[in-house]
Amino acid sequence: MVVGGLGLSATFVALGSVLLLGAEKRQEASLASVRSAGPNGCFRMRWPMCHEAAAAHDEMRAFRGVGIAGLIAGGAVLAATLGYTFFPRGPAEVRVSGEGITVAGTF
C-alpha cells in the first residue's frame, strides 16, 4: 500500500512537471508566432500566424492547468500515504499519573 502510494505520487508529480514544461514550450511558440506577424500584426487576428499563436496560447493554458492539477494530486497522494504510514492503527495506551498524561500508540 505504501509503495503503491509513493509510486502514484511520483507519477502525478512527473506528469505535472512534464505538462508544465510543455506549457512553457507552447508559450514560446505562441510568442514566436506573434513576433513573426510584426509589430501590432495580431491586433485584429487577420494573419494565419495569429491564429497559430492563439491556438498555442490556448494549449499552453490547458497544459498549465493540468500540470498544476497533477502536482497538487501528487502532493495529496503523498500526504495521504505518509498519513497512512505513520498514523497508529492499534489501540492507544493512556496512562495518567501525578506527573502528567502519557499517550503511547501501537505501531
Image (spheres, rainbow, N blue to C red):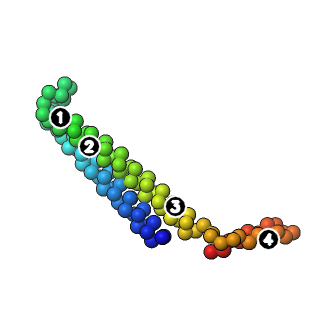
Q: Which residue is mark 1?
A: 51
Tell me if mark 3 has few (under 14), some (14-19) or many (20+) residues whose alpha carbon lies within 10 angstroms of its own: some
Q: In the rendered image, which residue does mark 2 sit on?
A: 59
Dot 1 alpha-carbon crowd within 10 angstroms: few under 14, some 14 to 19, many 20 or more = some
Residue 56: x percent and y percent? 22, 41
Residue at (35% x, 51% y) in the render? 67
Q: Position of residue 46 (x, y in %)?
A: 14, 27
Asked whether 91 or 67 is in front, the reply is 91
Does label 2 or label 3 sit earlier along the sequence? 2
Q: Secondary structure at mark 1?
A: helix
- Disc 3 versus disc 1: nearer the observer: 3
Residue 86 placement, left or right of 102: left
Q: Which residue is mark 4?
A: 95
Residue 13: image quadrant is: bottom left
| Residue pointed to by mark 3 | 80
Which of marks 2 and 1 precedes in the sequence? 1
Question: Helix, strand or loop at disc 3?
Answer: helix
Q: Earlier in the sequence, mark 4 or mark 1?
A: 1
Q: Specify few, some or many for label 4: CA neighbours under 10 Å numbering under 14, 14-19, or 20 or more.
A: few
Residue 103 shows up from this direction: yes
